[in-house]
Image: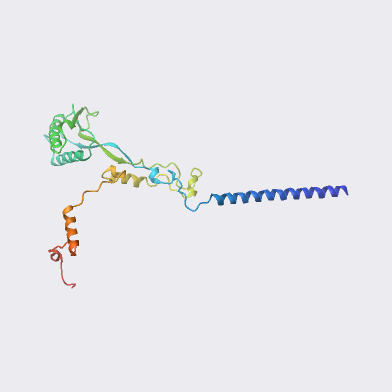
Amino acid sequence: MTNETSVDRARALLRHRDFKWAAMTGAMVGLAVILGACSETTGSVAQPVSASDDYRLRHPIAVQEANHSIVLFVGHARGGLSATQRADVFGLARGWVAEGTGAVVIDVPVNAPNSRAAESAVREARSLLEAGGVPANGIKLHRYTPDDPRTLATVRLTYPRMTAVAGPCGEWPEDLGPSIKNPGYFENKSYYNFGCAYQRNMAAMVANPSDLAQPRPETPAYTVRRTEGFEKYRKGTSTATEYPDADKAKLSDAGK
């Protein structure tokens, strides 16, 4: 009798403990639901985008100063520049006027088989640079001795300018396929090199690197054309431009 009573008491105690544990668990779940409901807002909260999720942050376009140069190949028996080389030098002068941030440096070879011809080419190149808008004090000469006498020593013209760069591309720190080294594969995220080629091409194509940072100001309106349009509008006539020779551009009237 005593043993049965002890067993019944033990079972009742276990049932009581299970009931208390279930009650505590239910209370914690209910409290979590209430707190979650209190933290809910009517509007959407913007979450910060990490560099691993946005290719523009992962491969940013940077504006920095870099050298722009052209190379002139001068033979040992030539006395000046060719027509193509003169066009290259004059084009470099126009580019320096528009975007140059420093002096034009001309590398001239010495102690080379074509040193005398290179000196003649440099004199002509210097006159073309000055004619293109580069001041005389903005042209610097740098004489150098070629490291390998078997290679043709060239004349190089260089000036610094602002340019946009991105990259380097082709880096693969993680596997593309499923791997224990790439836990982000199952999160449907883009791979590291994604978007790098696009950013690099965009940086190479932009004409003015400052356009990446700020818009250009608007040019003044053409006052003559605007006044003419307002005058026609005030009189109630058509503001469209009339071209008297527009019918002469038609090829045929067969479709009429």
Q: Quadrant of residue 212?
A: top left
**Point 87% across, 47% down: residue:** 2
- Residue 214 drawn at (x, y percent): 30, 44
Of 175 and 205, the residue lying toward us: 205
Rendered view: 136 above or below 42: above
Quarter of the picture holding the C terminus: bottom left
Residue 240: tell me if it is visible.
no
**Point 81% across, 48% down: residue:** 9
Find the residue positioned furthest to the right.
Answer: 1
**Point 65% across, 51% down: residue:** 26
Of 3 and 194, the residue lying toward us: 3
- Residue 88 drawn at (x, y percent): 17, 40
Residue 128: tell me if it is visible.
yes
For residue 31, side relative to residue 20 (left or right): left
Find the residue positioned furthest to the left.
Answer: 79
Of 252 and 180, the residue lying toward us: 252
Number of numbered discs on residues: 0
- Residue 109 drawn at (x, y percent): 19, 29
How is the rendered protein coloured?
rainbow
For residue 25, side relative to residue 231 (left or right): right
**Point 73% across, 48% down: residue:** 17
